[in-house]
Amino acid sequence: MSEHAELFDLTLTEEQRITRETMRKFAEIQLRAISRAADEAGAAPEGFYKKTTELGLSLIPIPEVVGGAGMPRSPVSNMLNAEDLGKGDMSLALGAVTPLAFINAVIDNGTPAQQEAFLSPFISDDFVPATIALMEPRASFEPTDLHTTAKKEGQTYVLNGVKTMVLLGDVAQQILVIANENGVPGAYVVPAGAQGLSIEKEKFMGLHAVNTSKVTLDNVTVNAINKLGTDDKPFQLQRLLDLSRIGLCAMSLGCAEAMLEYVTAYVNERVAFGEPISHRQSVAFMVANIAIELEAMRMMVYRAAARAERGLDFHREAYLAQVFCAEKTMEIGNNGVQLLGGHGFIREHMVELWYRNLRAVGILEGAACV
Amino acid sequence: MINLEISPGHQNLANMIHGMAKGMIRPLARKYDTLEHEKAVELENLAKMMEKMGGGMGGLGGSKKDKKEGESEPQIKNGTQMLGVIGAMEMCWACTGLTMAIPGMGLGNAAIDAVATDEQKERFGKVFAAMAITEPGCGSDSANISTTARLVGDEWLINGEKIFVTDGGQCTHIVVWATLDKSLGKAAIKSFVVPKDAPGLQVVRLEKKMGIRASDTAAITFTDCRIPKGNILGDPSIAQTAEERKKAFGGVMQTFDNTRPAVGAMANGVARAALDMTREILEKEGVILDYNKRRWNNSALQAEFYLMEAEYEAARLLILKAAWLADNKIPNSKEASMCKAKSGRVGSYITLRCVEICGSLGYGEEYLLEKFARDSKILDIFEGTQQVQQLIVARHQLGLSSRELK
């Protein structure tokens, strides 16, 4: 690495700058514009996902031999995209990048044969949904203590358990199920429609626009090749978790940016006691603190992603970024609604939607892997 | 290209400063906290060493020019601002009070570095200069000072009272803010370099404080205090138009864009000291801090520790950003205030929480945790309080003037 590349630096590369412009435009026109309607409908409108294929997100990292663009894996670029799309709408953004999370996990953990087998379906002009099923419905859920089990039987694996918050679970053509095999976490590709697989729609406080499902595995059997990795190079759960934390935090960063812009305009326009409420310190300081914590969130997320990109250990940074973003997005969501008073509580304004979506940080794991 | 790691060059310097601070300052921390106001003679050697290391940090603001003549400018720079904040973090990790008592590290030095003419730098470049702004009747509203300066012949006559002058007792010079004509407001405020032995200057008392006791805080009176005409910093004329007035005072206030990240860095340094010590104590007692379980599946103690670490890192990165902007000549007034606000409150939160978490060990004088908690509080007050920083950030964010958002 050149001396220059070792400097502390916050400037984007030329390519990232150009992509950022495209993403922001797309997020505004294709996500923000339909955000409220999609939230009310509890689903992305017809044709939305097809439109996201013009961004080429899924094809970019897929190896050339499989038919993709074979671009080097860039957690920073993916993180920036997540931030920009998240500013449009967090749940639609999650839906748009869910196949990419699956793809990244396969690239990170799969053998060349597995990459060929599980990534070639994505070489298509259509949006090909695929997802990761990690979470389980327990308050004290811990990714390293999974109750879903995988048992080797001859040349197959038999999976049993219940997964929750599986994004695009109802439409996914492939589901990467993370399960416990004799105390060791493994990742198993389960095709849609497998025998013993049942999928049930779930509803949450937020993230309405992305289809979320409970996935039950009742003696689901997959071939041995469907288990990612080898004995020498086993599946890395921690890496998946950390990269997913970066992705989700980046989306929340975008959402918090949207919140800051919205309340800034609102408090400058809203008049009470004869002047804009922004002229009062109690209001202005809340806005200032949103700006401060948001910038701090950005630095935390950028650092974790940049470390991942450089091949440095980034577990602690991703962990702390999630701790920080979970705390601060709660505060930003809460204060964002508060600043609009009663109007913030009405679904005519966006802030209540962001309040609900932002709460997913610190809860959702294993999604949006960058 | 996005990278938020300290460059290897700066990291080497940071390690060197850390080693020095750990070896030479930390062992004295308790002693001089207890002795209060006693001159720490051991620091004189340290000051000389830092001088040799290329002028130390150029005052805590680290505002010395670092570009050598003829050197081609790289696209992105990590320069003296970055080094200044990193240095301040390492020094205050050892002891905030003693760091402030190191000769030549005063805020007055930063002001001289920032605005002095070459001739003045020749005369004042090596002095130990304190900064005197606050008065008994004027704190955050620094445009409202009452100390006056009047030109009589070839001398300025200074009259007034200054309080909270850091290092005012042991410094050799004081940079004094005074007004040429109070009725003309901000535009008439100028700063003057006053030698301690100037006739009419009197140190009336040293304050007894909650923390940073190793650093003296003086109250100083000026009674027809005489200094040479050439000791005024910056332009002696009073701006006439509103635009010029704004610019003139803005120039004075700009010093803060450099010193605020530095004070934020001090708060960050003491916060890390508390975290390091708490971790050491907890690990000795078998508490594992490995970032493994989700935050709420840990013990309350671990969960709180992780949040403290996250807050510490967040503040640190905001400081580095503000310094990076300054090094690259990008306006950073908003970011300087952001990082000061964040670091100041995070410093108090972390040091106080660490005292609580470590129980009697935290509260007792066997360890330094209670001292860190006493020292950190001032860092959320001086160089612009938490509330002043929020005001500045809010005005930037909302696009409001000081008349609209008071």
Image (cartoon, rainbow, N blue to C red):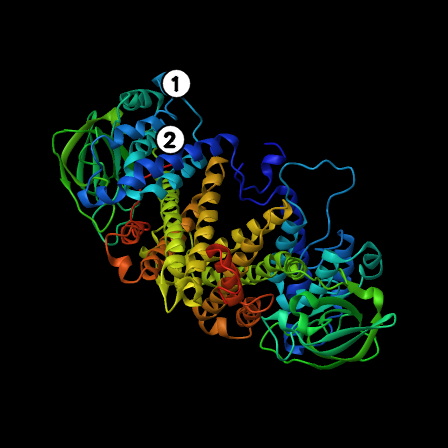
Q: Which residue is mark 1?
A: A64
User: Which residue type does callout 2 highlight?
Assistant: Asp
Image-based side of A114 in relation to A253, left or right: left
Could you give the CA–CA distance between mark 1 and mark 2, rounded to whole angstroms?
15 Å
Marks 1 and 2: same chain? Answer: yes
Image-based side of A201 in relation to B232, left or right: left
- Camera-side residue: B330 or A167? B330
Residue B1 lies, with reference to residue A316, above or below; the image says above
Which subunit holds the residue at mark 2?
A
Within-10-Å neighbours for mark 1: few <14, some 14–19, many 20+: few
Within-10-Å neighbours for mark 2: few <14, some 14–19, many 20+: some
The image position of residue A30, as x and y in percent, is 31, 35
- Camera-side residue: B237 or A366? B237
Residue B220 visible, this orientation: yes
Question: Residue drawn at (81%, 65%), measured in percent from left and top?
Answer: B231
Which mark is on residue A108?
Answer: 2
Q: Nearer the viewer, mark 1 or mark 2?
A: 1
Which subunit holds the residue at mark 1?
A
Residue farthest to the right?
B154
Quadrant in which residue A62 is drawn: top left
Residue B247 lies, with reference to residue B167, above or below; the image says above
Which mark is on residue B175?
Answer: none
The image position of residue A181, as x and y in percent, is 25, 37
Secondary element type, mark 1:
helix
Figure quadrant of the N terminus of chain B: top right
* Sequence order check, earlier mark of 1 and 2: 1
The image position of residue B391, as x and y in percent, is 50, 63
The image position of residue A362, as x and y in percent, is 32, 51
Secondary element type, mark 2:
helix
